[in-house]
Amino acid sequence: MVGGGALVRKPASPVGPLALLHRPVPEPPSSLRRGPLREGAWRSPLRSERTATLLGMWVGVAFAVCFATGLLSHLIQNPPSWFGWPSRPVNLYRVTQGLHVISGFAAIPLLLAKLWTVYPKLFEWPPVRSLLHAIGRLSLLVLVGSAIFQLVTGVLNVARWYVVMPFFFTTAHYWTAWIAIGAILVHVGSKLAIIRIGLSEPAAAEPPAAAVAGGLTRRSFLTAVAATSGVVALTTAGQTVPALSGITVFGQRDPRLGLQGLPVNKSAASAGVLETAVDPTHRITLDGPRPQQLSLAVLRSLPQHTVRLPITCVEGWSATADWTGIRMADLLDMMGLPEDAEVTVESLQESGLYRASVLAPPHSRDPLTLLALRLNGADLHIDHGYPARLIAPNRPGVLQTKWVSRVRAL
Ligand code: HEM
């Protein structure tokens, strides 16, 4: 009994396997405590709980944006039955995927600064206090490894430097995203107490500038990191935001440059359609209740419509153009398909992940969805999908099938 009768109980000591996890392990001989392991080896006053907490929060926000927008892109390309993606606003995917790449690039200086702030912890003494402590330290490998993996593979992918990735980028990046987000959540959970201290520590508690090497204060360090991240974001955004095109440094593409004023990702040569696409006997097959085969001349004789739509690459760049062709809704009517029919649009390309794409409502019946024959006032260039390609609002570029050979009812 303590003062006034309240019963104070000591926390129960763990028993069984839990006790094993907590049992202290012997400390290594102190003669090993040298170099970076010695006491006071890391003295930069820029490192503090507050700096680590704030940087961690910024990295967390950037990764959360990347995860949400990346997951959305994955769902649009691999839609489960419960998922529906609208065809309007036409620029929505442009915004979400642009944001994905911009926040990914902006996360790089943030993560580097965060790692610099906390890496002396690698050399803490004793290196291991208990089995639980060892597991906690090992889990950091997963956290740091998956975070670096996401940023490195993302950059390699937008740079189209596939030879240095001996795995399929999309699958590896997708599953590692779950690992990274899971590891971040576990890490935040295990550090809540320190995070609270970091957030409650007043900014004024930092040492005076004179006491810090080079006169750099924690505040100016954090400002410099935030400014670097902001500059990286702005100089990446030009591939998505036309007004910023002139200051693009990290963007993979300048959306203003390319054949017919539009960049090309997959050329006719790399798709192996150089001859088949220009073969005068080529016909587009409509495979439905009323099957038919249409020559280019017949397609040109059908009612033509012009729409202004962006082509938005999964790699973040996007560019708007004028497309002219036949409404997909008109073709589906010619095929005798009901309003809610789904079709597969196939390419002359014989193999490859993106040789066909599924077109379902609302995109299939949207009046902006065309089997396009012309781009910016001229026949499609062969690298843009001559003689005919799909263009639909609010869809990733990889689903806008080029060199169309067949529209098939599902
Ligand atoms: C510099 C950083 C990053 C860049 C440049 C980047 C780039 C990309 C690109 C280009 C794609 C499209 C892949 C495709 O559909 O072919 C993608 C997809 C994705 N990203 Fe990132 N990414 C970055 C960071 C991250 C981070 C930090 C996360 C999560 C923690 C993340 C999660 C995802 C997910 C879930 C997908 C969908 C993958 C799929 O379609 O299966 N990314 N990313």
Image (cartoon, rainbow, N blue to C red):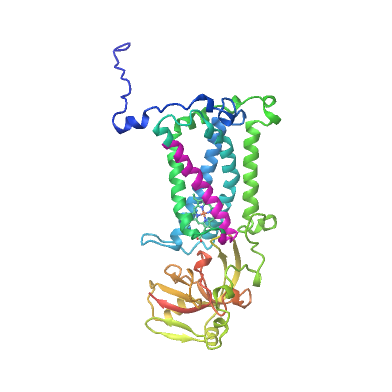
Against 352, residue 33 (above or below) is above
Judged left or right of residue 73, residue 18 is: left
Q: Who's the residue at 42% across and 40% down the image?
A: 186
Q: Who's the residue at 46% across and 68% down the image?
A: 363
Quarter of the image for residue 224 reads top right
Question: Looking at this view, is 214 or 300 the one in front?
Answer: 214
Against 230, residue 372 (above or below) is below
Q: Who's the residue at 59% across and 50% down the image?
A: 105
Question: Looking at this view, is 94 or 281 the one in front?
Answer: 281
Q: Residue 78: x and y, percent?
A: 42, 62
Question: Looking at this view, is 9 or 196 the one in front?
Answer: 9
Look at the image and say whether residue 145 sits in the magenta stretch. Answer: yes
Quarter of the picture containing the N terminus is top left
What secondary structure predominates along the stretch shown in magenta? helix
Quarter of the picture containing the C terminus is bottom left
Against 402, residue 8 (above or below) is above
Quarter of the image for residue 101 reads bottom right
Judged left or right of residue 72, residue 372 is: right
Question: Looking at this view, is 113 or 13 the one in front?
Answer: 13
Q: Residue 7: x and y, percent?
A: 29, 17
Look at the image and say whether residue 213 sits in the magenta stretch. Answer: no
Q: Who's the residue at 55% across and 76% down the image?
A: 272
Q: Which region shows up in magenta? A: 135-163
